[in-house]
Image (spheres, rainbow, N blue to C red):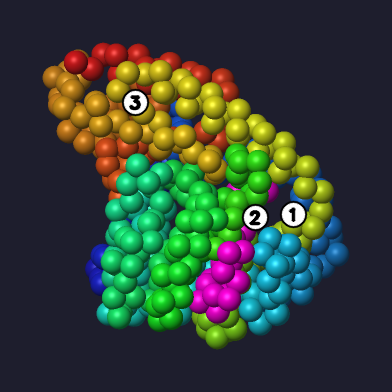
Amino acid sequence: TFVPAARVDRIRESPSVAAAQRVRELKAQGREILDLTVGEPDFDTPDNIKSAAITAINTGQTKYTAVNGIPALREAIATRAASRTGIQYADNQITVGGGAKQVIFLALMATVEAGVEVIVPAPYWVSYPDMVLAHDGTPVIVQCEESDNFLLTPHALADAITPNTKWVILNAPGNPTGSVYTREQLQAIAEVIEANPHVSVLVDEIYDEINFGDAPITSLLEVAPHLRDQVLVTNGVSKSHAMTGWRLGYGLGNSGLIGAINKLQGQSSSCPSSISQAAAVEALTGDQSFLTESVRSYRLRRDLSTRLLGAVPGLEPVVPQGAFYLFVNCAALIGKQTPGGTVIESDQDLVLYLLDEASVATIQGSAYGASPYFRISFAASEAVLEKAAAQIAAAVERLS
Ligand code: PLP
């Protein structure tokens, strides 16, 4: 019989992967489900990027690469980082991996062990706490308030830091809230980090291109470049360039950490796909008009879904400033009864009710460490978003 290592029992299956599986099962039974759980662009990868990959295949770029990727990709990453923050990263301060997810996983593997604490502000991307647990560490969840736009305050950060703290994870625009820190808020966080040189910051900027403000989002290192050795920035092409299936992400940090990540990658995957690397070079250096067009479209869908769900009595969407998720407060529906007589006791109950009665798949806030809320992805067509909102409205109306 199979006996898993303790770390497997310690972690949960990704709730978004589980939700997607449930949708597949219902669809297989012939149910028509509007799936708003998926965390990926509904656009196709742009043609120029596909062509770059096809050229890579046809010109023999199909072998192992260096563990830290092909030089052209590291150069493209360094150029982008320099234009965002003014910081120049050397070759040994850049790593590339099979998605930002793998880079984050290896960064934690390289630094976390029993006794190590990692501060995870909630609501959080589902994977952070489990990745910490997978490496025997302790996730320290800090609850952030809706009234603070779900952002980590410097006071809450300072209170959560202990001598055992190794990391705090900052994700903006955030999944699931789309919240973004202002320059002043980052400045205040930077001061706490500066006063705690034993703490590093993992800055997950995977959604930085999907931003609905007029100016680019501010990066922690823009306001505090002197903290660069205490900061690991992770990013990738999955969300920005509709390349989730290509599995290509990267990290920028101090050479000691990057060297450790590369050592672990060298003994696990060796390197990310050579073809995806060639595609990512085109994504980062080629025509960027896809970004403008896709963000314009996400903004329209954000406005549409915020308006439609905001009009449903009992639902209060939190207007996101970036990414493609809408986090919806459903506190007013807790305690209500379904037509079948079941009491909605939690956001999980509501999500199941919406799946059964509205045929709309969403994800409960508890998966992100914040209740009672649910998350929809608005990376879906306007027709689907309109239909989903109408079906949710009708199902909510049947609650008493
Ligand atoms: N970070 C956040 C906040 C995410 O939502 C995701 C994807 O869902 C990732 C990282 C991972 O992205 P990648 O496809 O580059 O692994």
**Residue 243 x, y percent position in the rendering:** 64, 50
Decide if residue 40 is on the left or right side of residue 273: left
Q: Distance between the residues labelled 2 and 3?
A: 33 Å
**Residue 343 x, y percent position in the rendering:** 15, 26
Decide if residue 319 is on the left or right side of residue 137: right
Please tell me whether mark 2 sits on a helix, a strand or a loop: loop
Up-down relation of residue 227 to residue 50 (above or below): below
Residue at the spot x=68%, y=76% of the render? 89
**Residue 45 x, y percent position in the rendering:** 70, 45
Q: Mark 3 points at which residue?
A: 315
Q: What residue type is labelled 3?
A: Leu
**Residue 153 x, y percent position in the rendering:** 38, 57
Location of residue 1 by image quarter: bottom left
- What label does residue 283 carry, if any? 1
Please tell me whether mark 1 sits on a helix, a strand or a loop: helix
Region in magenta: 221-245
Is residue 97 visible in this depiction of the protein? no
- In front: label 2 or label 3: 3
Q: Name the residue under label 2.
A: 237
Residue at the spot x=20%, y=20% of the render? 338
Asked whether 383 falls inside the magenta stretch, the response is no
**Mark 2 residue's CB less than 8 Å from ligand 1:** yes
